[in-house]
Image: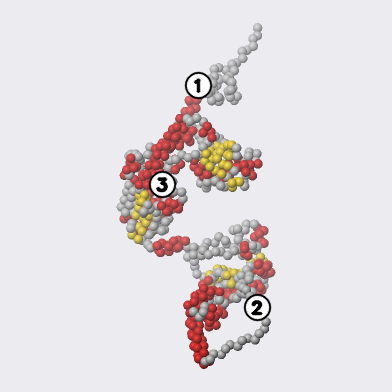
Amino acid sequence: MLQRAPIAPRGPRNSSPSVRSRGGIQKRNKAGGPVRVDRDGDLVMDAIAAGDKRRSGKGRLEGPTSSRGAGRGRGGPSRGANFGAVKTQQAIARGLETRQANILESRITTGSTTLQIDGLSSSKAASNPDGGVESLLAFLERKASGPNRNVKIKKSHKKGDSVFVTASSEDIAEIQKLDGFTFAGATLGIQARDSPSSASRPEKSGDKRKDEVSSNAMEIKERLKGVLAARYNSDLKLLNLSALAQDPGLREMGVFNGTTTTSKIFPALMVVCGGLFKTRQEKQDAIVSVTLADNDLADVGDVTALAQTFPDLQHLDLSRNRLAQMSNFDAWGAKFKHLSTLILTGNPIETQLATLKSDIMKKYPYLEILNGVQIRTPEEVAVALETAKSPILIAGPDFRDVGQVGENFIRQFVVLYDTDRSALLANFYDAQSVHSLSVNQNAARGHKNSGPIAPWAPYIKQSRNLVKINNLPTQMTRLHRGSQAIERVWSTLPATRHPDIQTLGDKYLIECHALPGLADPTGQSVRGVDGLIITMHGEFEEQSESPGKPIRVVSDMLSLRAWGPLALPKLPLNPQANTTIINTEQQKQEAMAMQLVERTGMTPQYSALCLTETGWDLEKAFMAFTANKDKLPADAFITNAAR
C-alpha cells in the first residue's frame, strides 16, 4: 500500500525567509535574525563566536560598538560614543594621565546635547509637507558648519511648535550661535533643553556613572581655578605659570605623581583659564604677561595651548628651560604677533642670540626687549612694520620719449581734458580710436590715506573692469570706438581739475616707451610708423556741478519811508584839531592794516575790511583770518605771497 511521504519538519516561525530550512533541530536566534547552517542544513553552533572572532581583530576596539552610524534620523549617540566620553572624563579625574595633549573644555564640563528651536511655525517653510523640519535642519547644519568642520544633527523630533534636535556637545555649541538668525522669514529662538526621552526614562547605572564622573570633573575644574587664582597678579596683570611641577595645589591633587608631565596638565589649565573670559578683549585687558620659567621645556610643544588661549600676549618669560634653537618655537607658529618682551635667560639658546636676533625680530615684529636689553625703539618698530606693509619699492618715472612728442601730448592732454574735452577729441581722436574706463574699488590704500572715498556712481555705469564684468555683451558695449561714441561717454563724467604738470610734477608717475612698426593709417609707409605707449598715474579733483560763489546773500530787507532832506553833520568848533585827530587815527589804522598784510598776505583792502569787522583789534583780526582763510577768494591775496 502506497503511503504519503512524511512532511519535513518546519523551521521556526519568524525566521528569515532568505535562509531555507532543510529540517533538523534549529536554535532560535535571540535577535530574531538569520542563523548559520552547514551544507546539510544543520545548525552551526559556534557561528556567533566565530563571527565575533572574525570581526574583532587587529585594529578594532573590544569595547561596545554601535551597529548604526550617527546621522540625522538614525537615533541618538551610540554607546561607544558615551563610553569614550566617560573614559575621557575619568582620565581627567585621575589627574589627566591620558596621552591627549589638547583637552577641550567640553571634556571637563558636560553640557546639554539637546536644543529647543522655536519659530518654525511662523516661517514660510511651515507650509511644506513635513512642516519645514527638513529645511530647518539643513539650514542649521549649513550655517553652523565651518570651513574645517561639518556640524551634524543626530536626532530630531517636532513637539507642538518646537523642534528638538540632538547632537554632540561641540556641534550644539555651534548651533546655539544661530540664536536670532532669520529662517524663511521667521526669527529662530534656540535654547538648551534636556532631552525629553532621557528625562522620562528611568536612571540607569551608566547614567549614574556619568553623573559621578561629571561631579569629579567639576571638582577638578574648581581646584584648577584655585591654582590659577593663586598665581595671578592683578597689579602686574601677570599669570605666573613657572615651576608647575612644584606647585603645592597641583601636587596635592596628585597630578605630578611620576607619570604626568607639564604637557598633560597645561592644556587643562588653559581650558579653565580661557573659560574665565567671555571675549578676547577681556583676556587682553586682564593678562598681558606670562612666565613659564623653570618648567624643563625642551620646546614649546608642551605649552602650545598658551598661544591658542592668549594670542595677544605682550610679555613672555621662558627663562631657565632647555630651549636650544629657533626650531623649538615652531609649535607656536605665527602666534604672539604683539609680543614686545621676551626673556630667554638660562636657556642654551642664549649663547646664540647675537646671531639669531634678526630671526627673532622677524618672528615677533613688535619685539623691543630681548633678555632685558632694548634691541629697538618703538619708532624703529613702527618703521619696520610700515616697510613690511609695502615691501615692493615704487620706481620713479621711466620716460623714453622720441623728439618730445609724448611730452607735448601729455601737456596738452591734461589741460584739454579739464577745460575742453571736445577739442581734445577733435585734435587727437578719430573714428578708429578706442576708449574704455575701469574702476578698481578694491585697490589697496595706505593706513595714512584713510579719508572717505568719493562715490563712483558717474564712473561705475561705464566701468569695464573685466574682473567684475564677466558678461560678454556688457563687455562689448562698454568698449567705445570713435570720437563721437567717446564724446558721449565723456559728457556723462564730472568735470575735473588736475594738478599743474609743470609745477607739480611729483603728483604724476608717467612712463613712455616707443613702439615701432605700427600700421600707417594713411598707407604711405610699408614698414609702418613709430608709436608710443604712455602710462600715467596721477590724481585729480572733481568739480562740483554748482560751485559756490565767494559771496552769497542770506537775507535782504528793503525799508521805505517818506522823503526828507538829510541832516548835515555839525562842524566841530576846532576843525584843525579834529582834522589832526582824524589824521592820527587814520595813520594808526593804516599801520595796523600793513601789519596784518605782512602776517596774512592779504591785500590792504581786505586787511582793512578784516580789521573793521573786528573793531580794529589786530589779534582778533588775525584769528578771524585764520578761521576763514579757506573761504576767501583768490583776489583777496597778494600774488606770490606766502599764506
Q: Where is residue 624 in the image (x, y as percent from the top left)?
A: 51, 75
* Residue at the (53%, 91%) spot, across then down: 573
In the image, is residue 88 above or below residue 469? above
Q: What element carries label 2?
A: loop
| Left or right relative to 276: residue 538 | right
The Cα–Cα distance between marks 2 and 1, rounded to whole angstroms, is: 125 Å
In the image, is residue 518 above or below residue 41? below
Lower position in the chain sequence, tag 2 or tag 1: 1
Q: In which quarter of the image is the N terminus?
A: top right
Which amino acid lies under the numbered mark 2 shown in the image of this protein?
Answer: Ser
| Left or right relative to 616: residue 474 | right
| Left or right relative to 223: residue 155 | right
Q: Residues within 10 Å of mark 3 (few under 14, many from 20)?
A: some
Marking on residue 559: 2
Q: What element carries label 1?
A: loop
Q: How crowded is mark 2: few (under 14 residues within 10 Å), some or many (20 or more)?
A: few
The residue indicated by pointer 3 is: 273
The residue indicated by pointer 1 is: 45
Q: How many discs appear?
A: 3
Which numbered mark, 3 or 1, is in the foreground of this view?
3
